[in-house]
Image: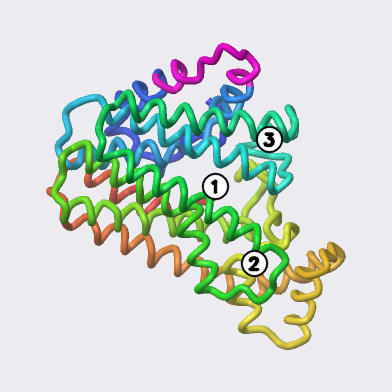
Amino acid sequence: MNQHQSTGPHDSFLNTIASDMDGVNRIIREQLHSNVPFISQIAEYLINAGGKRIRPALVLLMARAFGYRGTQHRMLAAMIEFIHTATLLHDDVVDEADLRRGQSSANALFGNAASVLVGDFLYTRAFQMIVAVNDMRILPVLSDATNLIAEGEVMQLVNVRNPDIDEKRYMEVIYAKTAKLFEVSAVLGALIANASGKEIDAAARYGRSLGIAFQLVDDLLDYAGETDVLGKTVGNDLREGKMTLPLIFLMSHCKENIRKTIRECIENHDEALLSSILEAVKASDALEYTAQKAQDAASEAAQALSALQDSQYKESLIKLSTFSAERNY
Protein backbone atom coordinates (compact mmCIF):
# COMPACT_ATOMS: atom_id res chain seq x y z
CA MET A 1 0.00 0.00 0.00
CA ASN A 2 1.30 3.44 -0.85
CA GLN A 3 2.19 5.61 2.15
CA HIS A 4 -0.38 8.16 1.03
CA GLN A 5 -3.25 5.67 1.17
CA SER A 6 -5.37 5.72 4.33
CA THR A 7 -3.54 4.03 7.18
CA GLY A 8 -3.59 6.56 10.03
CA PRO A 9 -5.41 6.46 13.35
CA HIS A 10 -8.13 8.79 12.08
CA ASP A 11 -9.08 6.21 9.47
CA SER A 12 -10.93 3.93 11.89
CA PHE A 13 -14.12 4.81 9.99
CA LEU A 14 -12.95 2.29 7.38
CA ASN A 15 -12.90 -0.65 9.79
CA THR A 16 -16.66 -1.25 9.62
CA ILE A 17 -16.55 -1.66 5.83
CA ALA A 18 -13.29 -3.59 5.45
CA SER A 19 -14.89 -6.54 3.63
CA ASP A 20 -16.94 -4.21 1.42
CA MET A 21 -13.81 -2.27 0.51
CA ASP A 22 -12.03 -5.51 -0.39
CA GLY A 23 -14.93 -6.22 -2.72
CA VAL A 24 -14.64 -2.75 -4.26
CA ASN A 25 -10.94 -3.26 -4.90
CA ARG A 26 -11.66 -6.56 -6.65
CA ILE A 27 -14.22 -4.86 -8.89
CA ILE A 28 -11.75 -2.07 -9.67
CA ARG A 29 -9.16 -4.63 -10.78
CA GLU A 30 -11.70 -6.42 -12.98
CA GLN A 31 -13.08 -3.25 -14.53
CA LEU A 32 -9.65 -1.82 -15.34
CA HIS A 33 -9.21 -4.50 -17.99
CA SER A 34 -8.99 -3.24 -21.55
CA ASN A 35 -8.09 -4.82 -24.87
CA VAL A 36 -5.63 -1.93 -25.18
CA PRO A 37 -2.90 -2.79 -22.62
CA PHE A 38 -1.62 0.80 -22.45
CA ILE A 39 -4.98 1.91 -21.06
CA SER A 40 -4.80 -0.63 -18.22
CA GLN A 41 -1.18 0.29 -17.55
CA ILE A 42 -1.90 3.98 -16.95
CA ALA A 43 -5.16 3.40 -15.06
CA GLU A 44 -3.58 0.81 -12.79
CA TYR A 45 -0.63 3.13 -12.16
CA LEU A 46 -2.88 5.78 -10.66
CA ILE A 47 -5.26 3.38 -8.88
CA ASN A 48 -2.32 1.52 -7.32
CA ALA A 49 -0.81 4.79 -6.10
CA GLY A 50 -3.31 4.69 -3.26
CA GLY A 51 -5.37 7.63 -2.15
CA LYS A 52 -7.80 7.91 0.73
CA ARG A 53 -10.71 6.15 -1.05
CA ILE A 54 -13.08 8.49 0.80
CA ARG A 55 -15.72 8.71 -1.95
CA PRO A 56 -16.22 4.94 -2.39
CA ALA A 57 -16.14 4.55 1.40
CA LEU A 58 -18.95 7.11 1.59
CA VAL A 59 -21.12 5.04 -0.77
CA LEU A 60 -20.51 1.91 1.29
CA LEU A 61 -21.05 3.52 4.70
CA MET A 62 -24.21 5.36 3.69
CA ALA A 63 -25.75 2.24 2.14
CA ARG A 64 -25.02 0.17 5.25
CA ALA A 65 -26.19 2.97 7.55
CA PHE A 66 -29.60 2.80 5.85
CA GLY A 67 -29.73 -0.97 6.32
CA TYR A 68 -28.64 -2.21 2.89
CA ARG A 69 -27.71 -5.89 2.90
CA GLY A 70 -26.82 -6.53 -0.74
CA THR A 71 -23.58 -6.10 -2.70
CA GLN A 72 -24.48 -3.74 -5.56
CA HIS A 73 -23.24 -0.79 -3.51
CA ARG A 74 -19.74 -2.12 -4.14
CA MET A 75 -20.15 -1.65 -7.88
CA LEU A 76 -21.41 1.90 -7.27
CA ALA A 77 -18.44 2.62 -5.02
CA ALA A 78 -15.98 1.36 -7.63
CA MET A 79 -17.74 3.45 -10.27
CA ILE A 80 -17.37 6.57 -8.11
CA GLU A 81 -13.64 5.86 -7.71
CA PHE A 82 -13.31 5.59 -11.51
CA ILE A 83 -15.00 8.96 -11.98
CA HIS A 84 -12.77 10.50 -9.32
CA THR A 85 -9.64 9.02 -10.90
CA ALA A 86 -10.70 10.33 -14.31
CA THR A 87 -11.00 13.84 -12.88
CA LEU A 88 -7.53 13.52 -11.33
CA LEU A 89 -6.03 12.53 -14.68
CA HIS A 90 -7.65 15.50 -16.37
CA ASP A 91 -6.81 17.89 -13.49
CA ASP A 92 -3.13 17.03 -13.57
CA VAL A 93 -2.96 17.77 -17.29
CA VAL A 94 -4.69 21.13 -16.83
CA ASP A 95 -2.51 22.01 -13.82
CA GLU A 96 0.68 20.61 -15.39
CA ALA A 97 1.20 18.74 -12.11
CA ASP A 98 4.24 16.50 -11.69
CA LEU A 99 3.28 14.81 -8.40
CA ARG A 100 0.17 12.88 -7.41
CA ARG A 101 -0.19 10.71 -4.29
CA GLY A 102 3.52 10.89 -3.54
CA GLN A 103 4.81 9.81 -6.93
CA SER A 104 5.10 11.09 -10.46
CA SER A 105 1.75 12.05 -11.98
CA ALA A 106 0.48 10.01 -14.93
CA ASN A 107 0.90 12.92 -17.32
CA ALA A 108 4.51 13.39 -16.21
CA LEU A 109 5.24 9.74 -17.01
CA PHE A 110 3.00 8.98 -19.98
CA GLY A 111 2.26 12.40 -21.48
CA ASN A 112 -0.78 14.66 -21.59
CA ALA A 113 -2.57 13.02 -24.52
CA ALA A 114 -2.48 9.54 -22.99
CA SER A 115 -3.64 10.84 -19.59
CA VAL A 116 -6.63 12.67 -21.08
CA LEU A 117 -7.68 9.68 -23.17
CA VAL A 118 -7.36 7.20 -20.30
CA GLY A 119 -9.39 9.61 -18.18
CA ASP A 120 -12.06 9.43 -20.88
CA PHE A 121 -11.86 5.63 -20.78
CA LEU A 122 -12.48 5.62 -17.02
CA TYR A 123 -15.46 7.95 -17.42
CA THR A 124 -17.06 5.73 -20.05
CA ARG A 125 -16.27 2.55 -18.11
CA ALA A 126 -18.02 4.10 -15.11
CA PHE A 127 -21.20 4.51 -17.15
CA GLN A 128 -20.93 0.91 -18.34
CA MET A 129 -20.87 -0.06 -14.67
CA ILE A 130 -24.06 1.93 -14.07
CA VAL A 131 -25.78 -0.18 -16.72
CA ALA A 132 -24.58 -3.33 -14.92
CA VAL A 133 -26.27 -2.18 -11.70
CA ASN A 134 -29.52 -1.79 -13.68
CA ASP A 135 -31.15 0.83 -11.47
CA MET A 136 -32.67 3.68 -13.46
CA ARG A 137 -32.78 5.96 -10.41
CA ILE A 138 -29.00 6.22 -10.53
CA LEU A 139 -28.48 7.45 -14.09
CA PRO A 140 -30.02 10.95 -13.79
CA VAL A 141 -28.30 11.54 -10.44
CA LEU A 142 -24.89 10.63 -11.81
CA SER A 143 -25.24 12.26 -15.23
CA ASP A 144 -26.25 15.57 -13.64
CA ALA A 145 -23.38 15.31 -11.18
CA THR A 146 -20.67 14.60 -13.77
CA ASN A 147 -21.93 17.50 -15.87
CA LEU A 148 -21.72 19.87 -12.90
CA ILE A 149 -18.24 18.59 -12.02
CA ALA A 150 -17.07 19.35 -15.56
CA GLU A 151 -18.59 22.84 -15.28
CA GLY A 152 -16.76 23.32 -11.98
CA GLU A 153 -13.44 22.46 -13.57
CA VAL A 154 -14.06 24.99 -16.34
CA MET A 155 -15.13 27.61 -13.77
CA GLN A 156 -11.86 27.10 -11.93
CA LEU A 157 -9.90 27.38 -15.17
CA VAL A 158 -11.65 30.64 -16.08
CA ASN A 159 -10.91 32.01 -12.61
CA VAL A 160 -7.15 31.39 -12.84
CA ARG A 161 -5.07 34.57 -12.58
CA ASN A 162 -8.11 36.59 -11.52
CA PRO A 163 -7.33 38.25 -8.15
CA ASP A 164 -10.89 39.56 -7.86
CA ILE A 165 -12.46 36.17 -7.08
CA ASP A 166 -14.44 36.51 -3.84
CA GLU A 167 -15.45 33.92 -1.27
CA LYS A 168 -18.93 33.43 -2.74
CA ARG A 169 -17.53 32.61 -6.17
CA TYR A 170 -14.89 30.37 -4.63
CA MET A 171 -17.53 28.39 -2.72
CA GLU A 172 -19.54 27.91 -5.91
CA VAL A 173 -16.48 26.44 -7.61
CA ILE A 174 -15.54 24.03 -4.82
CA TYR A 175 -19.11 22.80 -4.56
CA ALA A 176 -19.21 22.01 -8.26
CA LYS A 177 -15.74 20.56 -8.74
CA THR A 178 -15.31 18.71 -5.43
CA ALA A 179 -18.30 18.61 -3.08
CA LYS A 180 -20.76 17.43 -5.74
CA LEU A 181 -19.02 14.06 -6.10
CA PHE A 182 -19.09 13.60 -2.31
CA GLU A 183 -22.78 14.51 -2.35
CA VAL A 184 -23.63 12.06 -5.10
CA SER A 185 -21.59 9.31 -3.38
CA ALA A 186 -23.74 9.68 -0.27
CA VAL A 187 -26.95 9.88 -2.31
CA LEU A 188 -26.12 6.70 -4.26
CA GLY A 189 -25.59 4.81 -1.00
CA ALA A 190 -28.97 6.00 0.26
CA LEU A 191 -30.71 5.27 -3.05
CA ILE A 192 -29.48 1.69 -3.32
CA ALA A 193 -30.76 1.14 0.24
CA ASN A 194 -34.22 2.43 -0.76
CA ALA A 195 -34.04 5.29 1.74
CA SER A 196 -36.95 7.74 1.89
CA GLY A 197 -36.86 11.12 0.18
CA LYS A 198 -36.15 12.85 3.49
CA GLU A 199 -33.33 10.43 4.22
CA ILE A 200 -31.82 10.93 0.76
CA ASP A 201 -31.90 14.71 1.32
CA ALA A 202 -30.05 14.18 4.62
CA ALA A 203 -27.46 12.02 2.86
CA ALA A 204 -27.00 14.76 0.25
CA ARG A 205 -26.47 17.39 2.95
CA TYR A 206 -23.92 15.18 4.67
CA GLY A 207 -21.97 14.49 1.47
CA ARG A 208 -22.06 18.11 0.33
CA SER A 209 -20.80 19.45 3.67
CA LEU A 210 -18.16 16.72 3.90
CA GLY A 211 -16.87 17.58 0.42
CA ILE A 212 -16.67 21.28 1.24
CA ALA A 213 -14.70 20.49 4.41
CA PHE A 214 -12.31 18.30 2.42
CA GLN A 215 -11.65 20.96 -0.21
CA LEU A 216 -11.18 23.70 2.37
CA VAL A 217 -8.57 21.58 4.15
CA ASP A 218 -6.89 20.76 0.82
CA ASP A 219 -6.60 24.48 0.11
CA LEU A 220 -5.31 25.16 3.62
CA LEU A 221 -2.70 22.40 3.36
CA ASP A 222 -1.46 23.84 0.07
CA TYR A 223 -0.13 26.70 2.22
CA ALA A 224 0.55 24.93 5.51
CA GLY A 225 1.20 21.28 4.64
CA GLU A 226 4.34 19.29 3.84
CA THR A 227 5.02 17.80 0.41
CA ASP A 228 6.24 14.47 1.86
CA VAL A 229 3.04 14.06 3.87
CA LEU A 230 0.61 15.37 1.24
CA GLY A 231 2.08 13.43 -1.66
CA LYS A 232 1.88 16.53 -3.90
CA THR A 233 3.78 19.78 -4.19
CA VAL A 234 2.93 22.44 -1.60
CA GLY A 235 2.26 25.96 -2.91
CA ASN A 236 0.88 24.86 -6.26
CA ASP A 237 -2.34 26.88 -6.01
CA LEU A 238 -0.51 30.19 -5.62
CA ARG A 239 2.04 29.21 -8.25
CA GLU A 240 -0.77 28.41 -10.70
CA GLY A 241 -2.60 31.67 -9.98
CA LYS A 242 -5.57 30.10 -8.16
CA MET A 243 -7.43 32.23 -5.64
CA THR A 244 -8.34 29.83 -2.84
CA LEU A 245 -9.83 30.82 0.50
CA PRO A 246 -6.60 31.57 2.42
CA LEU A 247 -5.54 34.05 -0.27
CA ILE A 248 -9.05 35.47 -0.71
CA PHE A 249 -9.18 36.13 3.04
CA LEU A 250 -5.77 37.79 3.00
CA MET A 251 -6.76 39.99 0.05
CA SER A 252 -9.73 41.37 1.97
CA HIS A 253 -7.91 41.86 5.29
CA CYS A 254 -4.41 43.05 4.40
CA LYS A 255 -2.77 46.40 3.83
CA GLU A 256 -2.81 47.95 0.38
CA ASN A 257 0.85 47.22 -0.34
CA ILE A 258 0.33 43.47 0.28
CA ARG A 259 -2.86 43.54 -1.77
CA LYS A 260 -0.92 45.12 -4.64
CA THR A 261 1.77 42.43 -4.37
CA ILE A 262 -0.82 39.64 -4.50
CA ARG A 263 -2.51 41.19 -7.52
CA GLU A 264 0.81 41.55 -9.35
CA CYS A 265 1.80 37.96 -8.58
CA ILE A 266 -1.55 36.48 -9.62
CA GLU A 267 -2.00 38.55 -12.78
CA ASN A 268 1.60 38.49 -14.02
CA HIS A 269 2.76 35.09 -12.80
CA ASP A 270 5.64 36.73 -10.93
CA GLU A 271 7.26 33.82 -9.05
CA ALA A 272 9.71 36.19 -7.33
CA LEU A 273 6.79 37.33 -5.16
CA LEU A 274 5.63 33.85 -4.10
CA SER A 275 7.66 33.56 -0.90
CA SER A 276 6.58 36.96 0.44
CA ILE A 277 2.91 36.12 -0.21
CA LEU A 278 3.26 32.72 1.47
CA GLU A 279 4.73 34.45 4.51
CA ALA A 280 1.91 37.01 4.52
CA VAL A 281 -0.71 34.24 4.43
CA LYS A 282 0.91 32.44 7.36
CA ALA A 283 1.32 35.67 9.34
CA SER A 284 -2.36 36.56 8.93
CA ASP A 285 -5.48 34.82 10.24
CA ALA A 286 -6.15 33.30 6.81
CA LEU A 287 -5.27 29.72 7.73
CA GLU A 288 -7.22 29.87 11.00
CA TYR A 289 -10.22 31.30 9.14
CA THR A 290 -10.07 28.52 6.54
CA ALA A 291 -9.68 25.87 9.24
CA GLN A 292 -12.74 27.21 11.07
CA LYS A 293 -14.77 27.14 7.86
CA ALA A 294 -13.75 23.50 7.42
CA GLN A 295 -14.75 22.72 11.01
CA ASP A 296 -18.12 24.40 10.44
CA ALA A 297 -18.73 22.31 7.30
CA ALA A 298 -17.73 19.12 9.14
CA SER A 299 -20.16 19.98 11.94
CA GLU A 300 -22.94 20.52 9.40
CA ALA A 301 -22.17 17.09 7.95
CA ALA A 302 -22.42 15.45 11.37
CA GLN A 303 -25.69 17.25 12.11
CA ALA A 304 -27.20 15.92 8.88
CA LEU A 305 -26.82 12.39 10.28
CA SER A 306 -29.54 12.98 12.88
CA ALA A 307 -31.96 11.45 10.36
CA LEU A 308 -30.14 8.10 10.62
CA GLN A 309 -30.69 5.45 13.26
CA ASP A 310 -27.73 4.77 15.54
CA SER A 311 -25.38 2.10 14.20
CA GLN A 312 -21.69 1.37 13.79
CA TYR A 313 -21.96 2.78 10.26
CA LYS A 314 -23.45 6.06 11.48
CA GLU A 315 -20.62 6.26 14.00
CA SER A 316 -18.12 5.75 11.20
CA LEU A 317 -19.75 8.56 9.21
CA ILE A 318 -19.40 10.84 12.24
CA LYS A 319 -15.72 9.89 12.51
CA LEU A 320 -15.31 10.61 8.80
CA SER A 321 -16.73 14.12 9.24
CA THR A 322 -14.24 14.75 12.07
CA PHE A 323 -11.37 13.41 9.97
CA SER A 324 -12.32 15.67 7.05
CA ALA A 325 -11.51 18.82 9.05
CA GLU A 326 -8.63 17.54 11.19
CA ARG A 327 -6.49 15.65 8.67
CA ASN A 328 -3.00 16.75 7.66
CA TYR A 329 -2.83 14.87 4.34
Left or right: 248 as drawn, with respect to 111: left
| Neighbours of disc 2 within 10 Å: few (<14), some (14-19), many (20+) | many
What residue is rendered at 35% in x and 47% in y?
A: 184
Residue type marked 1: Tyr
Residue 237 is drawn in which quadrant?
A: bottom right
| Secondary structure predominantly adopted by residues drawn in magenta | helix
Q: Earlier in the sequence, mark 1 or mark 2?
A: 2
Query: In percent of the image, x 52 and y 30: which residue is there?
Result: 122
Q: Which numbered disc covers residue 105? A: 3
Decide if residue 272 is in sight here: yes
Residue drawn at x 75%, y 58% as measured from the top left: 239
Q: Which residue in the protein does label 2 denote?
A: 243
Label 1, on which residue?
A: 329
Q: Residue at x 16, y 52 (%)?
A: 197
Separation of marks 1 and 2 at Cα, in angstroms: 21 Å
Q: Is residue 35 magenta?
A: yes
Q: Residues within 10 Å of mark 3 (few under 14, many from 20)?
A: many
Disc 1 crowd, CA 10 A, few/some/many (<14, 14-19, 20+): many
Which residues, given as a range, are shown in magenta?
Answer: 27-41
